[in-house]
Amino acid sequence: MTLAGVIDDQVFRNYRALLDAEDEAFDELEHAYEDGDRDHFEEDFSAWRKALGRKLAYLSRLGVDLAEVT
């Protein structure tokens, strides 16, 4: 089955939630950077990496191979 065959409303909802979580984590990271708050920056960087990792893992489970994207 191709990836197009498994994309449905639930996939979009799940992916949107992961995008929103990543965006929120990145916003916090950006604020810590702009404020020069090193302690919060480190925490927020870790939270952003985890959110990004969850999104990439989800894409991988769907069969999206990012190594093929150029």
Image: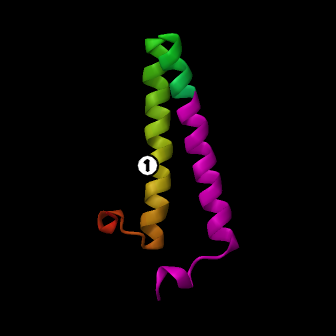
Q: Is residue 15 left or right of residue 65?
A: right
Asked where in the image residue 21 lies, by quadrant, the reply is top right
Secondary structure found at label 1: helix
Q: Is residue 12 magenta?
A: yes
List the single residue furthest toward the top.
Answer: 36
Residue at 48% in and 51% down:
54
Return the residue nearer the eye: 35 or 25: 35
Quarter placement of the C terminus: bottom left
In the rendered view, does 46 fall on the left or right side of 12?
Answer: left
Give residue 62's position: percent from left, percent from top. Answer: 48, 71
Residue found 42% across the figure and 22% down from its top: 42
Image location of residue 19, percent across then percent down? 58, 50
Q: Residue at x 43, y 13 (%)?
A: 38
Q: Amino acid at mark 1?
A: Gly
Q: How many marks?
A: 1
Magenta span: chief secondary structure = helix
In the displayed structure, would residue 15 be above or below residue 45?
below
33, above or below 36, in the image: below
Foreground: 70 or 32? 70
Residue 56 % position (x, y): 44, 56
The magenta stretch spans residue 3: yes
The segment highlighted magenta reads 1-27
Q: What residue is disc 1 on? A: 53
User: Which class describes the residues within 10 Å of circle 1: few (<14), some (14-19), or many (20+)?
Assistant: some
Above or below, comparing residue 70 to residue 7 in the picture: above
